[in-house]
Image (cartoon, rainbow, N blue to C red):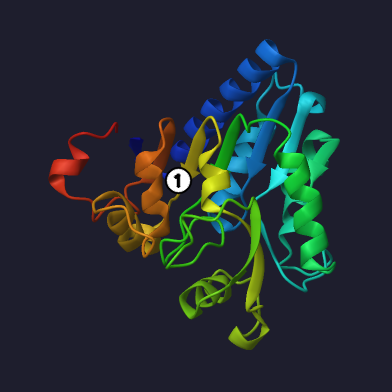
Amino acid sequence: MIIKIFPSKAALALEAANDAAASLREAISERGHARIVAATGASQFEFLEALTRLPGIDWKQVEMFHLDEYVGLSDQAPASFCKYLKERLIDKVGLENYHLLDGTRPAEEVIEQVSAEIRKAPIDVAFAGVGENGHLAFNDPPADFDTDEAYIVVNLDEDCRKQQLGEGWFPTLADVPRQALSMTIKQLMKSRKILVIAPDARKAKAIKACFDGDVSPFVPASILQRHPNTTIYLDKESAALLSTAAVETYSA
């Protein structure tokens, strides 16, 4: 695991986008196509904006998988992650091959369909964030590190739901769904490469818990310490609580 700390959110986003683009170009060059997992949420705004502006990516050769989505939420709802990905990635680059998680369909059917597709070949690069409660995708603590399923239905804890409210996706806490479809920890960890984009001061406690401590289901993103090719992209604010000993080993 490599942790890189940048002076601003914009600098972080551009460097992460360049890293992602290089991985996509390499996969397309070597195998004729690239498979990615795309994350959503406020932490990904600048990163996706930067990535979609970069030249030299043949997006018609990219296959995209969706990280998570609320159960029961229409893709027309403002908080829909399907809507988010269409507007911020799919429609911008003309992506043709993608697998979105439809929260309005029976969860078992969606899971069966998307799981069958994602298991056909390895994911080249996955984009992810870290929740304020340390979650990875919508795997809230304590996360299931052991299931071999590719996607599962998860119950969202109150901290997670408050984060969604705080980011402005919903008008009240009561409007935030209590369940979601989520890629599992094991499935995400199968990715050849993982890029974590996690700016902002509100993520600082989670970043410290996940990357300054032990691996534990109670801080789900800590599992990334065991991945052979993960880079964590932070700004000064999200990295602020990391220990001096840890920071000395990180790239600035």
Identify the residue at horizontal 79%, vertical 39% (top origin).
Answer: 92
Identify the residue at horizontal 57%, vertical 58% (top origin).
Answer: 42
Identify the residue at horizontal 32%, vertical 48% (top origin).
Answer: 236
**Residue 104 spot, x, y in % from top left:** 83, 69
Classify residue 215 as left or right of residue 64. left
Image quarter where the C terminus lies is top left
Q: Is residue 102 visible?
A: no
Sort mark 1 into few (<14), some (14-19) or many (20+) by Cα contacts within 10 Å.
many
Residue that badge 1 annotates:
9
Q: Is residue 151 visible?
A: yes
Classify residue 118 as left or right of residue 144. right
**Residue 160 spot, x, y in % from top left:** 51, 72
Identify the residue at horizontal 77%, vertical 44% (top origin).
Answer: 116
Classify residue 132 as left or right of residue 37. left
Q: Amino acid at mark 1?
A: Lys
> Which of 249 and 228 lies nearest the eye of the viewer?
228
**Residue 40 spot, x, y in % from top left:** 62, 53
